[in-house]
Amino acid sequence: MKHYLGVGIVGNFANHLEQAGEASDFCGICSEENAPKGIFPFYVPNHEKLQRFCFDNQKIILPEDSTLCVQAEPEVGIECDITYENGYIKTLVPKFFMAFNDASVRNDKNAKKISQKKNFSTGCKGYGNKIAIDSFQEGGVCDDFSIASFIKIDGKIHAYGECSPLLSYSFFYDKLLEWLIQKLNHQEDMVVLEDMHRIIKNNNFPEKCIIAIGATRYTHLGETRFLQNGDEVNILIFNHKKYDPNTLESLLREERLPDDEKNLSILQQKVVKQ
């Protein structure tokens, strides 16, 4: 992972930006209806400000500045191989998908770009066990999976994000890949977004990337409460033909989630101070 490019997608799930208080950041960015707003980097090995390795699959480490407020962002992560032609991305080939947390600072008034809210500690991103992708198109394995998230506060489990099928993302499969390639090659530096082609070029054209494809909608609790020391965030990608969210919540409460890596990707992170 230390040699991967880490990027995320903004606005690939209806109403998440409004809940996160970030919709106004994109007023000047034109896109088709329900399309994502853009791409941001969160980990770039050869980057002055984003080179800190920020993955920790056991902990969410809060910012050193205790005035900064953090929310988890439960989403699907996709690991891709990258090929290039004439200095531009030609293909993205999805290999694995997994539970992913793209935790973000919400109230940093000095942040001019999305990326400045993302790499805030050595434990601000995390991913669950990887599930192999047979075919990233309709009829493939992802058809049968959903995402759910929960937070443990003072020993009690609460729903954190809305349970949602992966197919409820605004852009998915070929539409998502085509959009990603276009944005990675041609997204300009404007408003809160950055020139992604320049970042990729300056990073010597990485051959692999991890893409956080967009956070789901929060429950009321998730929307209104920032993470606190001692909380535990649980993000589950699950085969909804085998499991349902109520059963998973009960198993989580009883601390006996099954070891079923073909049908479950599990990320559990304890929130800690620096």
Image (cartoon, grey):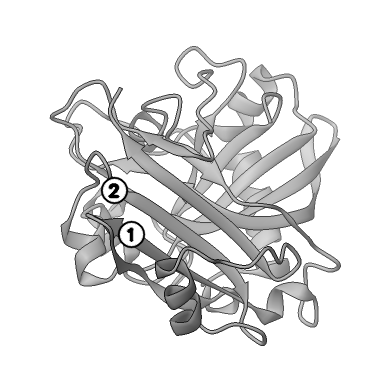
In the picture provided, is 123 more to the left or to the right than 112? right
Decide which of 38, 216 is in the foreground and name it. Answer: 216
> Of all residues shown, which one is farthest toward the top?
48
Residue 46 is situated, as x and y percent measured from the top left of the image, at 61, 15
Within-10-Å neighbours for mark 2: few <14, some 14–19, many 20+: some
Counting labels gives: 2
Q: In the rendered view, would you say 21 is above or below 274? A: below
Query: Which one is in front, 249 or 101?
Result: 249
- Residue 190 in the image, given as x and y percentages of width and height: 39, 37
Badge 1: few (under 14), some or many (20 or more) residues near its Cα, within 10 Å? Answer: many
Q: Earlier in the sequence, mark 1 or mark 2?
A: 1
Name the residue type under label 1: Ile
Query: Residue 166: where, in percent of width, then height?
Result: 58, 73
Q: Residue at x 44, y 57 (%)?
A: 234
* Residue named by callout 1: 151
| Local SS, label 1 | strand
Q: Cβ–Cβ below 8 Å for labels 1 and 2?
A: yes
Q: Does the image show residue 102?
A: no
Rendered image: mark on residue 12: none
Of residues 99 and 94, the one drawn nearer to the viewer in this rendering: 99
Question: Which quadrant is home to the C terminus?
Answer: top left
Give me the residue at 53% from left, 84% from top: 244
Residue identifier under label 2: 231
